[in-house]
Image (cartoon, grey):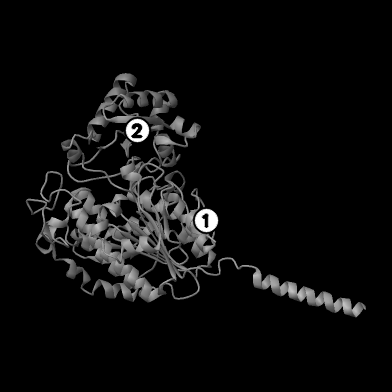
Amino acid sequence: MKYYITVVLSTLLTISSFSQTKQSPKINNDKPKLVVGVVVDQMRYDYLTRFWDQYGEKGFKRMIAEGYNFKNNHFNYIPTYTAPGHTSVFTGTTPKYHGIISNSWYDKFSKQYVYCTSDDEVQPVGTLNSAGKMSPNRMLATTISDENRLFTQMRGKTIGIALKDRGAILPAGHTANAAYWFHGQDEGNWITSNYYMDELPKWVTEFNISGKKLDYMKTWEPLRKIETYAESGIDENLFETGFKGKNAATFPYNLENLSKENGGYDMLKVTPFGNSLTADFAIAAIDGEDLGKDEFTDILSVSFSSTDYIGHNFGVNSKEVEDAYLRLDQDLGRLLGALDEKVGKGNYVLFLTADHGGGDVPTYLTSVKIPSGYFDDVQFEEDLKGFLKEKYKREDLLESVSNDQVFFDYRVVQEAEIVREELEKSIAHYILQYPKVSNVYTRQQLESGEFKNGTAGLIQNGYNQKRSGDVVYVLDQAVISYTTTTGSTHGSGFSYDTHAPLIFFGKNIPHGETAVRSEIVDIAPTISVLLGISFPNSSTGTPLKAILEKKN
């Protein structure tokens, strides 16, 4: 009897164990081989809808037809610039924590302006130019790329690619195998620094000498008949900058003839061909870096920078911007096709977003009776210093006025026996009365309170205690500080700068769309959940349930 009971119990335990083994789901046993993060520089959300009828079937339309479209996706901080944007996408947090508070900023400790990725401790690779002296050294947080490297014991690769160094370096993180960016002038090569490697891989060298850059030094004409570009303004107008050596900012543009006066190969950046060259290089990288070839997920970040250069030059309502997006649509189609072929359809996940939007040219808005204008930074700083001289009898209380922030010289403030909080209030009151300024916040306010909504919340999310200034001001809607009265820019917390596309596409991504608000910091934790890896170490975003919770 005892033997019988033992056999029965043993059999039941075996059946139970087998049942549990068979029925218990494995966590993350179906990961993509490759995650591709695409950032389109200065892409407003409405570029998806405005140019929709002009797009082909293989780019934006394919992603939306097969993927998930977040139609109400926003940046949740100020300032909306390129470096903070790329960093926030991949760290899942804001400048408050990742520390990239602008493209360049005044450093209170070294008493100088610093560039977001400059690094004098590294050496250029692929060039002798200082354009190669770059690294992620100023970024304080980890990225999803870093976390994937850590999770896979450095076996999952990370490659970052962009025309702009900051667009390549910051998304790739601290542990990247490589980040490659484009150095124009008289070279026109993809380069890196010895932060990543001591010499360029063979495939990069071969790409640089392949003649691709020469192929694109041609005439930029509209992709289609310009009369069909009904979604943008007239070709010749007063709101565009254009190129040196050409009287009017109108098609066509002969790049070979104009390049000598416009930076040599750097001119490619200000045409759609810069994006095409980026797509070519990214496709070459899939093979060159063996991406998506084994069981360890790799990450490829690709930033298309030319759309930003074109927007700054010609403005968001220009024929040139419309043409740039129709051509980008084709380049995205080529990239998706290459991923299907080289990694395998259904083996990768791709997300597409932007680093910021862009506003209409104020002179154009004024012409159609919409309130707008320009803010004179130089005059403002002179007036502010004049106010301080009259009130405090000192001309040296400030170290810098930059990035819409005022930085105190703490040593001078202390010597003058001025209470810092009172100086903050005094300056804030003065600035608030200044024309074209809508809001002002002091260090005391931003450090002592928590603002969850509105402009104050956006400022606070972009405010880093150690790196930011002592008084922060916000300009009126559609008012910009810019060196010219032509071309568009960005940086504000208004919807034209914060509303950016967000599309997820690929392996296990459901088809659908939502108008529920999402934020740019939600992307990184969503990818972390998809991969089953740790969130970036400063992540403040929320995983997007819409694409993570499978419907029965």
Pointer 1: what residue? 535
Pointer 2: what residue? 473
Q: Nearer the viewer, mark 2 or mark 1?
A: 1
| Tag 2 secondary structure | strand
Is there a contact, CB below 8 Å, between mark 2 and mark 1? no
Q: Which quadrant of the structure image shows residue 264? A: bottom left
| Amino acid type of the residue tagged 2 in the rendering | Tyr
Camera-side residue: 138 or 22?
Answer: 22
- Indicate which disc, 2 or 1, sits on the residue closer to the N terminus: 2
Residue with the most extreme right position = 1
Q: Quadrant of the C terminus?
A: bottom right
Camera-side residue: 347 or 20?
Answer: 20
| Amino acid type of the residue tagged 1 in the rendering | Phe
Place of residue 413 in the rendered image (x, y in percent of width and height, measured from the top left) = 40, 27
Place of residue 517 in the rendered image (x, y in percent of width and height, measured from the top left) = 43, 46
Alpha-carbon neighbours of circle 2 within 10 Å: few (<14), some, or many (≥20)? Answer: some
Residue 175 relative to residue 389: left or right:
right
Place of residue 125 in the rendered image (x, y in percent of width and height, measured from the top left) = 32, 66
Place of residue 360 in the rendered image (x, y in percent of width and height, measured from the top left) = 23, 43
Q: Residue at x 44, y 41 (%)?
A: 461
